[in-house]
Amino acid sequence: MSSDLVIDVRNLNKRFGTKHVVRDLSLQVSAGEIYGFLGPNGSGKTTSIRMLCGLLTPDSGSGTCLGHDVIRQTAEIKREVGYMTQRFSLWEDLTVRENLDFVGRMYGMRNRRDAVGAAIDRLGLGSREHDLAGSLSGGWKQRLSLAACMLHEPRLLLLDEPTAGVDPKARREFWQEIHELAATGVTVLVSTHYMDEAERCHRLAYIAYGRLLARGTAAEIVAERALGAWTVSGDELAGLAPKLVPLAGVDHVTVFGSQLHVTGRDREQLARSMEQAARQYGDYRFAPAAPGLEDVFISMMDNARDDRQ
Amino acid sequence: MTLGQLSWSRWYGIVVKEFIQLRRDRLTFGMIVGIPVLQLLLFGFAINTDPKQLPTAILAADTGVFSRTLVAGLRNSGYFDIQRQAHSEAEALSLLHSGEVQFLVQIPEGFSRRLVRGERPALLVQADATDPAATGNALAALSGIVDTALSHDLRGPWAGLQPRPPPVELRVHRLYNPEGLTQYNIVPGLLGVILTMTMVLMTGLAMTRERERGTFENLLSTPALPLEVMTGKIVPYIIIGLVQVTLILIAARWIFTVPMQGSLLALYVVVVLFIAANLTLGITFSSLARNQLQAMQLTFFFFLPSILLSGFMFPFRGMPDWAQALGSLLPLTHFLVLVRGILLKGSGLVELWPAVWPILLFMAVVIAVGLRFYRRTLD
Ligand SMILES: Nc1ncnc2c1ncn2[C@@H]1O[C@H](COP(=O)(O)OP(=O)(O)O)[C@@H](O)[C@H]1O
Ligand SMILES: [Mg+2]
């Protein structure tokens, strides 16, 4: 059902000089989906999103966005996509309303006044509409950006780390808004760092060092990786961690509050090492656990780095 | 190339945005008022130099030996570069009027014969004195040149003619600026300098500012077309430029009492042309520059030769050939000819066409470069 695909790109590549920033990216996103785009800093998320909306030209590869060719039909794509940049990119020396008015004019909206008024009401910007955008706090700027990129009622929203640097309450409200939008049939591609946000997406893609490492629902990704995971609890965990790292089968030891997370790709070897460690360090409780999304991503990132070297 | 229809609504949106931003930008506003005032004060007094090899035309109605001696003497002085032999008075005057020559030397009929008879024939020298610094020294040296040149020939049988009073009656006419006031020259020149500086700089910053603040990415993600953005951004500056011009003209008229011979309409036509040339250069600079600093540097790279080589700071014809060649690439050089021509000489646009087309050519080249380097993506 390729007609259902809002984004359908294959083997996109992008280099900056000698730096291969995006490698053979293939991505399929269906209509009405909230699609999470995850990966560490510098992994190529922003570059990928910019290629999708015509701001960067891929070196190779092909595909469509809203049915328009990502290389040749960027003008059409720009008209129909709402793109929220990672950094605040509206005009700080314009007021909230002036910014929205400007954006409305850029999209040639005939009912601009009404649309701007409606967007201001919807995102609760009314009390700030005559403030300069530059004087707003992070949370308000993010709302303004969202209002601006939804103003022309695009069918596809590309949101690049929209919640970075925003407090938890504002983040929660933001996701509420995203889900309401998706319910009306808008497709959303959102890049993020936060695992709790990843879990709110219908489907995910994980990218590291420019390479797409996993796709699917959160559960599928975790299951596919088949990662072994154990938790260790007790006192003085910080002292114990370095002793576990060199053990056979242990890839990662991470402190999570009052617990250690120990993970490894070789589940059997990990289990043997953990059972042995449990005997050796009797003061601590060792227990097998279900790996989380974050464990899986960290493990994949390490592998990707090893591959590169 | 981006396909698509140009949209008035988008273009208007950009114009509105630029006006709002300009209104809130105190620094730029200060520049608009401050730069003309500052420069008028700074350059109110001229810098005099000693230019040589000034283009000169001869209208010789006499071919006698003394006539030739005189011409040789003028040439040897180094001040006069005799480029043209005019054949009629009308031709000679038009050479002067169009600015092709700075001096016109008229040797009347029967000059040699009357000289020999001791009738003290008149030698008429007409000078284009719009730029007094350019003509002053040459004129001052003139009578000495004439005396020395003739003293070689006035020997033997004619030695009796040697004594004072001088054998030739020298008549000098300073045209267009009879009192040789430098501010007449400097104030119109300032018009060009101020426009060059502010127009190129402000538009030079216009695009790089968007890029540096990250707003360029937003602008680029909307359907706005490059042409809409570029022209939309220019509009407010054209108006600023015209305001500046009007300020300077008022100062010129009422403070420096510069005469205004020609038509104001012609002047404003020329001004708009010149503003447009500078704005396209500014926009092109900001397409080439990666940040505001680079745009600023490019502007000064352009501004410095504009001041030094255009004939604003030093008389154009006093400069070496290579400098004149470089100078004639700059719009300011031609603009100075135009403004001085219109304000001081009352020349019309048709006469001044030789100074108009180089500005048009400059613009065409700059636009071509600008479109070539306009970034349509973030690559
Ligand atoms: N315009 C550019 N020129 C050169 N390098 C770039 C450019 N944009 C991004 N990069 C590099 O490409 C890599 C990926 O960047 P980016 O796509 O921003 O990653 P992410 O959004 O996942 O943090 C980074 O190493 C970054 O330095
Ligand atoms: Mg990014």
Image (tube, coloured by chain):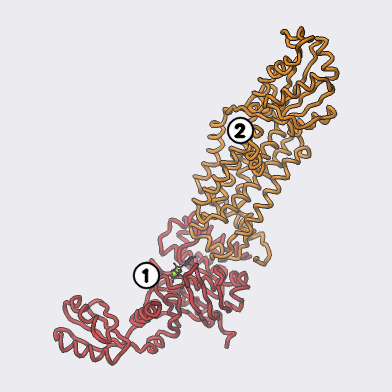
Chain colours: A red, B orange
Report whether A207 appears left or right of B38: left
Between the C-alphas of marks 1 and 2, the distance is: 67 Å
Q: Quadrant of the C terminus of chain B?
A: bottom right
- Residue shown at 62%/51% (left/top)? B234
Quadrant (top left, top right, bottom left, bottom right) of the N terminus of chain B: bottom right
Q: A248 or B59: which is nearer to us?
A: B59
Please report, as a chain letter, where disc 2 is located. B
Q: Is residue A164 left or right of residue B242?
A: left
Picture coordinates of residue A51, whole percent (x, y): 54, 72
Asked which quadrant contains residue B125, the reply is top right
Instruction: Where is residue B294? Give x, y as percent.
Output: 51, 51
- Label 1 resides on the chain identified as A
Circle 1 SS class: helix
Q: Amino acid at mark 1?
A: Lys
Q: Amino acid at mark 2?
A: Phe
Dot 2: within a 10 Å radius of its alpha carbon, few (fewer than 14), some, or many (20 or more) residues? many
Splitting the image into 4 quarters, where does residue A288 fall?
bottom left
**Rendered position, A306 above or below B183:** below
Residue identifier under label 2: B314
Q: To which residue does mark 1 refer?
A: A169
Q: Residue at x 76, y 30 (%)?
A: B96
Q: Does the image show residue B253?
A: no
Q: Position of residue B216 (x, y in %)?
A: 53, 60
Q: Is residue A40 left or right of residue B280?
A: left
* Pointers 1 and 2 within a single chain: no
Q: Nearer the viewer, mark 1 or mark 2?
A: 2
